[in-house]
Image: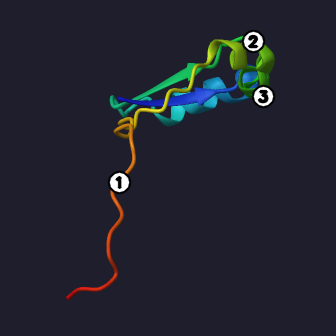
Amino acid sequence: MIYCVIPRELESELLPRMREYYRDNPGVEVIVDRRHGGASERRRGDRQAADERRVIRDRRRARIPGTFPAVDDDPA
């Protein structure tokens, strides 16, 4: 299914035209975007609250504790 999403601001102008255009194509449904707030508002959100909720973990394995023995540079 393919959705042709019409912005709410252009509903009266575009919705009838797009429904007419796609009426013979059963794989396309023309719908109106009814979400509240713009995309920029959703993306921006409350950054501080989001940062406080987000926990970043280091998923790498921890190193084995201790030190490595010294290695001689002479291959003899």
- Secondary-structure class at tag 2: helix
Q: CA distance from mark 3 to mark 1?
A: 53 Å
* Residue at far bottom of view: 76
Crowding at mark 2 (Cα within 10 Å: few <14, some 14-19, many 20+):
few
Residue type at numbered disc 2: Ala
Quadrant hosting residue 56: top right
Crowding at mark 1 (Cα within 10 Å: few <14, some 14-19, many 20+):
few
Kindly identify which residue carries mark 3. Answer: 40
Residue type at numbered disc 1: Phe
Asked if residue 17 can be seen in this view, the reply is yes
Residues 45 and 7: in front is: 45
* N-term-proximal mark, 1 vs 2: 2
* N-term-proximal mark, 3 vs 2: 3
- Secondary-structure class at tag 1: loop
Camera-nearest label, 3 or 2: 2
Camera-nearest label, 3 or 1: 1
Q: CA distance from mark 3 to mark 2?
A: 17 Å
Kindly identify which residue carries mark 2. Answer: 49
Residue 7 numbered mark, or none: none
Give the residue displayed 32% in from the left and 69% down from the top.
71
Query: On the rendered structure, is 57 left or right of 73?
Result: right
Kindly identify which residue carries mark 1. Answer: 68
The N terminus is located in which quarter?
top left
Quadrant hosting residue 48: top right
Crowding at mark 3 (Cα within 10 Å: few <14, some 14-19, many 20+):
few
Q: Is residue 49 above or below residue 24?
A: above
The C terminus is located in which quarter?
bottom left
Tags 1 and 2 touching, CB below 8 Å: no
Q: Is residue 64 above or below residue 31?
A: below
Q: CA distance from mark 1 to mark 2?
A: 44 Å
Measured from the top left, where is residue 40 in percent x and y?
Answer: 78, 28
